[in-house]
Amino acid sequence: MGLTEINFDGIVGPSHNYAGLSLGNLASASHKGDPSYPRAAALQGLAKMRHNMGLGLAQGYFLPLPRPNGDLLARLAVDDTAERALLAAAWSASSMWTANAATVSPAPDTADGRCHLTPANLSTMLHRAQEWPDTKRQLELAFADTRHFAVHDAIPGSLGDEGAANHMRLCESHDAPGVEVFVYGRQGGEFPARQHEQASRAVARLHGLDPARAVFIEQNPAAIAAGAFHNDVVSVANGTVLFTHEFAFADQHGAYESIRKAFPALEVVEVPASAVSLEDAIRSYLFNAQLLTLPDGSMALIVPEECRDNPRVWGWCELMLAGNGPIRQVIPVDVRQSMANGGGPACLRLRVVADPATVDPRFLLSESRADAIEQCIAAHWPEQIDPADLGSPALAATVRDARLSLLETLGLHELG
C-alpha cells in the first residue's frame, strides 16, 4: 500500500469512570460523580472505528492499560485515609484518548527517513502521568521494525508534553514531506497550560525535523481559560487545510503567516467567534474532530453528535458545506460516553503515517477483529460503574479479567 495515514483509536477500558480528575476539562468536571457505562463507551468507540474503516480508511487500535494500577497505589501508600482522587487516578481509563499517547513525525519529515514516535509524559495530571511507560511498551510492539520506526522515551516530566493533541501536520499528501506545527501554552486563567514550548522543541529535535519545516505557535490563553486544555479543542489540520477557531492562537494572523512561510499551500478555514463562540466550540467539540482525506481525495469532518445538537454550530457547518471550501462532508458520530469525560473523536485517535505492512498486524483493525473485540467487550466489560465502586476488590478483578480477555482475543499476551 505504501505510506498512508492510519488512525489508531484507543479501545475504551473496562474501568472507564467519571472521577473529574482533569483540571481545565469542563466536560470532565461537570460529569464528576456520575455513573459511567464502560461497555457502552467501548462499543461506541468501536463503532466509530468501524465507520471510518467503512469509509475506506486504514484503522488501528491501542489496548487499555493495566488498571487499577497497583504500583501507583503502593507508591502513594493509598489507604482509607488517602484522598479519594489518588485512588481514582489509579483506576483511570484515560489512555483511551490516544491523541495524548505520543507525538508522531512521519518518515518523509525526518532526517533518517524513519517514522519517529515520542510518548507524551502527561506530567501535569497524576492520572495521566502514569501512562507513558505502558504506552511505550505498546508503541514498541506495534512499531517494532526499527528499519521504519524509532520509538523514544518521554521528555523529562519537568517539561509538560501532551502529545499529538498539540501537534498538527500540513502536507500536499500524506506520503510527501510535511510541515509540523507545535502548539504550546502559557497560563490560561485558573487553568494550567499543559504543553510546554521547550518540550515541543525537544520533540522536534529528537525526531530530526528540519528547523525550516517546524513551526512553534502559542495557544491563545483565552482559549485555555475557556476550557480548551489542548489545541485540538480549537483547531485541527489535514493535508493543506487548517480548520480553526478565530481565537485558537495567541497571535492568530501571526500564526497563519508563520505557517504559510513554511507551507505556502496553506488553506485556512476559520470559524469566526461571531458565528461560533469559544463556549459553543468547546461545548460541542466542533474542532475536536477527525479531519480526514477520503479515498476519492475529498475531505470529511467527523464530529461528535453534540455538534448537530447545537443550532449555532450546526448552522455554521451547513453554511460551510453550502460554499465551495475544501471540507465537503460533516459526519456526526456517537461518542457520548467519551464526550462526557472531555474527549471527542479527535481525542480518541493517534494519526500515524506508515505503510500498514510495516506495522504489527495485531494492532490493525479488520472486520473479523472488530467482531472479536465487540464480542469480548459485550461479554466482559462492566455495564455500569458508580463512583463508590472504585476500590472494590470485586470490580478490580472484573476489570483486570476483562482486559486479559481482550489481550487473549487479540493474541497480545506480551502486554499482560
Image (cartoon, grey):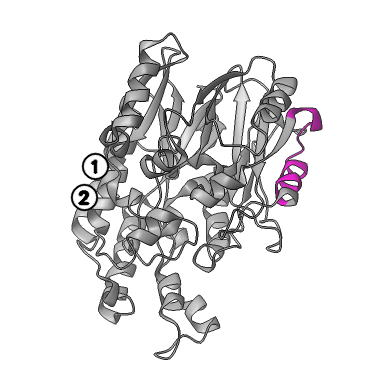
- Classify 74 as above or below 400: below
Residue 375, labelled with which disc?
A: 2
Q: Main secondary structure of the magenta part?
A: helix
Name the kind of residue labelled 1 in the image. Asp
From which residue to which does the magenta span run? 199-213
Label 2's element?
A: helix
Q: Nearer the viewer, residue 406 or 257?
A: 257
Residue at 45% from the left image edge and 25% from the top image edge: 292
- Find residue 59 and report its horizontal and vertical position in percent: 41, 34
Residue 134, labelled with which disc?
A: none
- Classify 312 as above or below 139: above
The residue tagged 1 is: 371
- Find residue 395 and report its horizontal and vertical position in percent: 27, 74
Labelled pair 1, 2 in contact (Cβ < 8 Å): yes
Check the image and name the residue furthest to the right.
211
110 relative position to 124: left or right: right
Residue 125 picture quarter: bottom right
- Find residue 86 and report its horizontal and vertical position in percent: 46, 77
Residue at 61% from the left image edge and 47% from the top image edge: 221
Check the image and name the residue furthest to the bottom.
81
Label 1's element?
A: helix
Residue at 54% from the left image edge and 29% from the top image edge: 237
Image quarter hosting the C terminus? bottom left
Instruction: Report, in whole angstroms, how far the alpha carbon at label 1 lies from the one at label 2.
Output: 6 Å
Magenta stretch: includes residue 77: no
Magenta stretch: includes residue 208: yes
Name the kind of residue labelled 2 in the image. Gln
Residue at 44% from the left image edge and 50% from the top image edge: 97
265 relative position to 303: left or right: right
- Find residue 243 and report its horizontal and vertical position in percent: 51, 27
Crowd tier of the residue under label 2, counting other residues whose Cα lies within 10 Å: few below 14, some 14–19, many 20 or above: some
Residue 68 picture quarter: bottom left
